[in-house]
Image (tube, rainbow, N blue to C red):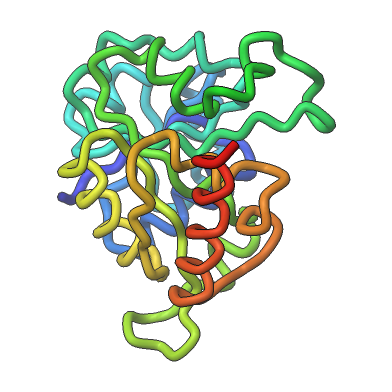
């Protein structure tokens, strides 16, 4: 896997794109503005990334990373994403973004709602529980003592494994939590979202969180 498309060129998308470049990926970026404007931004903020339309960026990408505001997720065309491994790095955080009715149902995670719109995509939840500054600053080589861990949730295990390879190349220990519903353990407001954990501590927190969810 070599080609990554990042949809969204805000602070999160730019940090993800730079980290992917450092991981050795061919990175294409797309945003809501004109390609020419995105190209100028990319030249300054994400040197090495190629600016394209969303459709062109996704077409030949091995993996797509969604880093748009969650309130805009329905602007993402599901057609070109069918069959693609798609990373959902978005969050629902009502105190910051205001309440969104469809995400107020606590029985579902935000990713479980997003995947209904992106029908056909192989959705994986991760990269949502690390700050954009930390993503670039905390990365370390495999085997580093205390290496930070990141959770990966998906109903598609092969897609999850592909994303776990990406997380490792990004500089973090990937931890598969299970299906998309288990991504609740690292949504905003959780211990995992609010902290930074090495693998063993991360797995312990994950067990606590999912045990609580199952018994709720």
Residue 145 in the image: above or below residue 137? below
The residue that appears at 27% across and 9% down in the rendered structure is 79
Point out the image quarter for the C terminus. top right
Residue 24 in the image: above or below residue 35? below
Q: Position of residue 128 (x, y in %)?
A: 55, 45
Q: Residue furthest front?
A: 215
The answer to whether any part of residue 28 appears in the image is: no
Determine whether, in the image, residue 71 is placed left or right of residue 125: right
Q: Position of residue 7 (x, y in %)?
A: 44, 30
Determine whether, in the image, residue 92 is placed left or right of residue 166: right
Snapshot quadrant of residue 5: top left
Residue 110 in the image: above or below residue 207? above
The residue that appears at 15% across and 50% down in the rendered structure is 1
Q: Residue furthest bottom?
A: 145
How many marks overall? Answer: 0
Q: Position of residue 210 (x, y in %)?
A: 50, 49
Residue 173 in the image: above or below residue 61? below
Q: Position of residue 53 (x, y in %)?
A: 38, 20
The residue that appears at 68% across and 42% down in the rendered structure is 188
For the residue pair 116 and 178, the one nearer the viewer reads as: 178
For the residue pair 59 and 124, the one nearer the viewer reads as: 124
């Amino acid at each position: 896997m070599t080609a990554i498309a990042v949809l969204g060129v805000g602070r999160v998308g730019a940090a993800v794109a730079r980290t992917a470049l450092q991981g050795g990926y061919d990175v294409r970026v797309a945003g809501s503005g004109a390609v020419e404007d995105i190209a100028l931004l990319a030249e300054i903020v994400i040197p090495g990334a190629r600016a394209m339309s969303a459709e062109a960026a996704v077409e030949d990408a091995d993996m797509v990373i969604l880093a748009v505001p969650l309130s805009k997720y329905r602007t993402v065309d599901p057609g070109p994403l069918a069959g693609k491994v798609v990373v959902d790095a978005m969050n629902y955080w009502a105190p910051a973004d205001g309440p969104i009715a469809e995400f107020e149902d606590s029985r579902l995670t935000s990713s479980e709602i997003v995947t209904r719109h992106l029908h056909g995509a192989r959705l994986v939840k991760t990269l949502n529980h690390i700050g954009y500054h930390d993503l670039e600053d905390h990365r370390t080589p495999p085997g580093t003592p205390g290496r930070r861990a990141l959770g990966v949730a998906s109903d598609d295990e092969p897609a999850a494994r592909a994303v776990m390879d990406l997380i490792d190349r990004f500089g973090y220990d990937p931890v598969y939590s299970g299906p998309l519903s288990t991504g609740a353990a690292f949504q905003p407001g959780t211990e995992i979202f609010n902290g930074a954990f090495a693998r063993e501590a991360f797995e312990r927190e994950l067990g606590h969180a999912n045990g609580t969810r199952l018994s709720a």
